[in-house]
Amino acid sequence: MTLLRRIWAAVIFVNLMVLSIFVGFSALQFGNINSGLVGDRLVVLAERTAAPFEAAAKIGLPLSTVRNAKALLERARQFDEEIINILVFDAVGNVVQSTSLETPTKISIEAIAARNASQGEPWHRETADGFLSSIDIVSSNGETAGGIMIVYPGGGSLTRVLAMTTKLSFVAIVTLVLSTVVGYFMLSFAIRPQLIQFENIEANISSFEKAAWRHAAGDVWDDPLHEKRHVKSELYELLKQTEDNYTSIGKSLAADKDYEK
Amino acid sequence: MKVHDSNFSRKSFRVRLSAILFVVIAASVLTIGTATIIIFDRAVEPELSKRTRLIASIAREDIQRALDIGINLNEIVGLERYLVGILHKFNEVERIAVSNVSGKVLSAAVGQLPSASKEKSYLGEVFTFSQASFKLPILDGNKTVGDITIEISPLFVPSRIQSVLMDVTVIAMIAILIALESVLAVAIASVDKPLTRIHVLLEEQRNNRFLHTIRHGNGGALSRVAARLNDRAFDLASRSRGLSGNTRSRMNNKLGTVIAEHVPVRLRLSDVADIRLTLFLFSAATEISTSFLPIYARDAARPIWLNSEFAAAAPILMYLFALAALSPFGGKLSRRFGARNLFIVSVPPTVLALSMMGWSNSVLEITFWRGVLALSYATATIACQEFAVRASGVNSNSAGISAYIAVIFAGVLCGSAMGGVISGRFGFEAAFFTGAFLATVAGLTSCFSMRGRAGDPVSAWTSADNTVHETASFGMSYWTLVTGVAAPMSATVAIFIWYLTPLMLSELALSPADIARVVMLYYLCTVVLGPLFSHFTKTPKQMAVLVICGALISVLALYSLNFWQGVWAIVFSVTVLGFGHAAIRIPLYVLALNAGGGQTSCLTPMRLVERCGAAVGLAISALLLNNLDVEFIVQALAVAVLFGIVLFVAANAYEKMKRGMM
Amino acid sequence: MKPIALALYAYIFVCCVINEAAASQYKVMIITWRGCENACRGFQEYLVNRSVDAEFIMRDANRKKDLISGFLDEARAFKVDLILTWGTSVTSGTVGMIGDMNNPVFNNEIPTVFTIVADPVGSGIVKSLNSTGRPNVTGTYNRVPEKVNIETILAYMPEFKRLGMIYNLNEKNSVLKRNEIEKLAHSMKFELISKQLPLNADGEPDVKSIGPAITEMKAAGVDFIYLGSSSFLRDHAELLTKASIENGLPVLSPYEDNVRSSDALISVAARYYDVGQLAGRQAEKILVEGVKAGDIPVALMTNFAVVINLAVAKKMQRFPPLSLLQIAEIVN
């Protein structure tokens, strides 16, 4: 039974570890998925915000010269009150217009890197400051005239990930409890022959110990395995033989020591 | 009645216990995996709807602006162009139409043919999705004058959910791989090793050898036996020290005893499974950047003379060349200093290299540290390979190599998947630091797991331990095996799996995540099928047949692209190639060891040729790709593999004929 | 007697001091072509809002070139600190061409800021927009590139093929613009149908010929009318737009007020008030910051808007497309 319990405890531990790893990675992956979803939604907004500026770029007006740019951006910002800022930037990343009072001079380094990596396609990133979503604006000659970038807060995303983690943890706990119970019965059924054999080994060891201390008290080596359910194994013989070897060598050593004296 | 101890078969207990544990844990993972998919689906689907609704809202807003300034709905100019523009920008929109209040369609834009989109994926039957179309009214003042209808492809939401399903499957795979290694470690530590130790010591003491002691665990009958056996050795050694030298040797000669002169030495048994968890963690650590390294390198700062394509490939090339450079020396170092010491010494540079790759800003720094990582990876994996071969013994090389290869590939799978997930959430740097952490844990576990004799230097081995033959023959069959089978296989992996497959799939507009999943199929075949194949092939003849079949299957996989193109053709090719290589890998090493008389030194030329083959092959194809088709390069690979296997068969036939004549 | 004299002297002294104190720091002469309109007002209000203590001396040429030299004499007599010139005719009449730098007839000493000049380089007033090449001259540039105007027409009317343009031989800028459009016609693949306004006995363009010219263009298959660069046509925009509407021809004007108040359909332009403000900034640099006029590049206008007159669009049953509606300011 001890062996079974030890193995069962190991099953619980390994299961707990694996489920924790699963929940951890799933929560991380959900964060990625959620980030992707928010980003996809912001890309829609960025696309539509860019449309009037694209119309301006197509007729050749530089983005910085569109007189009613602020109004156009504000119209887009009103689609989602959570939007922190919408920026219009030129081809090299200088901000020419924004909805917030403090207009940065250039788009951030992360935004520049993401823009370079996306090679003209719409992109979104989750950064320490929140979500960034952007789209380039192409002029009539096919060159990039600049782009639109939306800055969105990231706090809500963390809340959703934590909520998901809680849900998954609950499921993991339930799964752990169920698998623990099922695992116990499966183990005790599936490795029953081995458990019995191991029990037999332990019984052999116990009976050897019994025989050994009786033998030390003068009794002959006897087979104290009276219970029919236990079978004498080779282990018993080995133990007995090595005990005899040890005893005779020990006695020789004692005799040699006396002789030397 | 005496019963032989083999009734308690340790191997069968290990297998059965591992199977049960694995089933229980896999069932847990599958249960939570299924629940996760459903929970994710419920979280994702409303978000997708929000996006579509937003598209419709914005379109309506634009149209309403025209109405607000006095243009009637049926007078709006450029409406169709505008709707077509929306269709092109948002590929989930299948149809968008503006109708007047009586339902007459004033303008519409339609995407793909409606009939094609009516096919529902199986996911659509499993999960219920909300509406696939939105209708928003258009107002002019307080009057409804029409509506805008937007229909999304019924495959859009299922395809996104399918992507979620793939993600969860990858995570489940990570969990199951970790579970497998943990389960095996538990199975061995529970009963297997304690019982083996006791039996070995009993056999020694039966032969009057009292040189060793063993670990005696934490209680129970086995623990008591171990303590007893240990005490015998301690007792006799202590009493024997009390005698003079002459008396002692006279007694030993008379009784035929061998007693420890000082303190009995701890008996350290080695098992192939000792390195599994350690090597798995180490392999996962070093492969953590596989899924994103080219992108990371491409986006890093680089000198003007280095273009972005070469910047992306530079770390891979440096990795291959560094591996090739160290290959001739790794085996010698392991035999000289011991596999355990070599592995432990490899860990700090690995940790440093991974950390520095995370901190690096330029492609030159990344490439340099990737080279350092390659060197320490080479020494660590060669050390583990040497350990596995020694631990399995000359007659069971197959088991050792099988375990070694399965664990390396499992680590590759797990590491690259983990790296993808972590980098997606926390950035590339976090993934590198996670790799460094895993490598540290691998180093710590090695201190406990590689204690066995197989980790000692060759000089520490006694003649009794050294069961390998002294003579090694590097005959024709060995060299044709190395040059005709190992080198083409390695080149095929580097060229086709690492380089061409991502390139071809990228041109077919597959996302990086999907490309990674296709490449994973190759590694999955090796992890799952490799041990199965080796289980059923025992003799050198069977292994040679397996190698030949595997090579022919590889040729088929490569050549199939001549007849079938597209994403599924590449998936088929990659999977079948994985199948073929799974058949080759383990027998390849075992045959090489056999040809080398069981000496691990015979693996050195093979490692060198393999790695050089991969590096040179990759460099050549990168150069040739400017002037030649991908199809031509794949065909050339197929021909090279076929030629190599013909060479191997011919060499074996020749040697057999020569032996027959002698 | 002595106390009275003393008081008188003191009184005169105080008056002089007060008078001295009451006189503005700067004297600025503004020479307009047809009265002080938005640009002129924008200029003045900029300086006032910036607390630049300037006295404005207003002179209006009332569309007569010969009056300009007289204004220059006055400016010299008053020792003005700066002259603002409105339009190409006034500017060229005041400072001459770049080759007139040593000609005492023209102003080569008093700092001059020009504004509402369609093409200062083309008309030979300055060397380039970056560097005028004239030590006492700088100004503002407020036109969008002509390509933008044509692209706007194409955005409004994708099927556009023929552009109609009336030009005034008397106005150099009008001729220059016509030539510029002709060059553009080749590269942008449209046809230009241009018509010079005939001159009457006084050598002035004949107002009555505007209507028939438009009718002729309609007969020639013109799709769109471009007003080009002409103060004459600008002043008589209502005649032009009326004729155009009658002939079903939309008009693109580079002057925003033509759209807002003269029934042109569409313009891509800067607000004149904003242009005046920009000229005010140039003047501030010269007067307050002490920068030499010739060292200041010509300031480029950076705020343009597409303005569409919806009433005209309705009349012509030619509504703007959704793409332009997204960006345009709509009037009427």
Image (cartoon, rainbow, N blue to C red):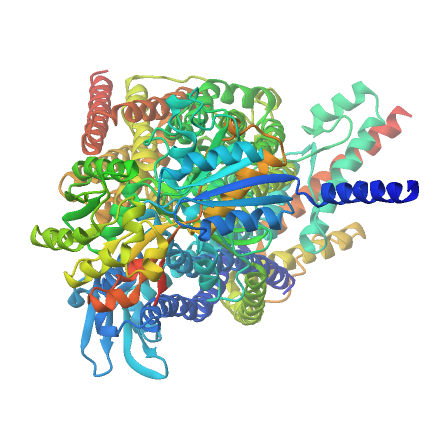
* Image height of B622 relative to A70, above or below: above
Q: Is residue B296 visible?
A: no
| Residue sitting at the far front | C1
Could you say where residue B137 lies in the image, as x and y percent from the top left? 32, 78
Residue A216 drawn above or below residue A178? above
Name the quadrant containing residue C261.
bottom left
Q: Quadrant of the N terminus of chain C?
A: top right
The front one of B450 and B136 is B136
Instruction: Point out the residue furthest to the left here.
Output: C219
Residue C37 appears in view: yes
Task: Tell me which residue sits at (34%, 79%) in the image.
Answer: B139
Q: Nearer the viewer, residue B112 or B217?
A: B112
Left or right: residue B34 versus residue B647 is: right
Quadrant of the image for the C terminus of chain C?
bottom left
What is the x, y in percent for residue C198? 16, 44
Q: Give percent across and percent down for residue B203.
A: 61, 39
| Residue in the picture at 35% in, 59% down | C328
* Left or right of residue C96, residue C239 in this image: left
Q: Nearer the viewer, residue C121 or B149?
A: C121
Relative image position of residue B230 (x, y in whole percent): 73, 41
* Quadrant position of residue C172: top left
C175 over B592 or under it: above or below: below
Residue at the spot 31% in from the left edge and 17% down from the top edge: B475
Residue C320 higher or lower than C83, as above or below: below
Q: Nearer the viewer, residue B17 or A234?
A: B17
Q: Is residue B308 left or right of B656 when viewed as pictured?
A: right
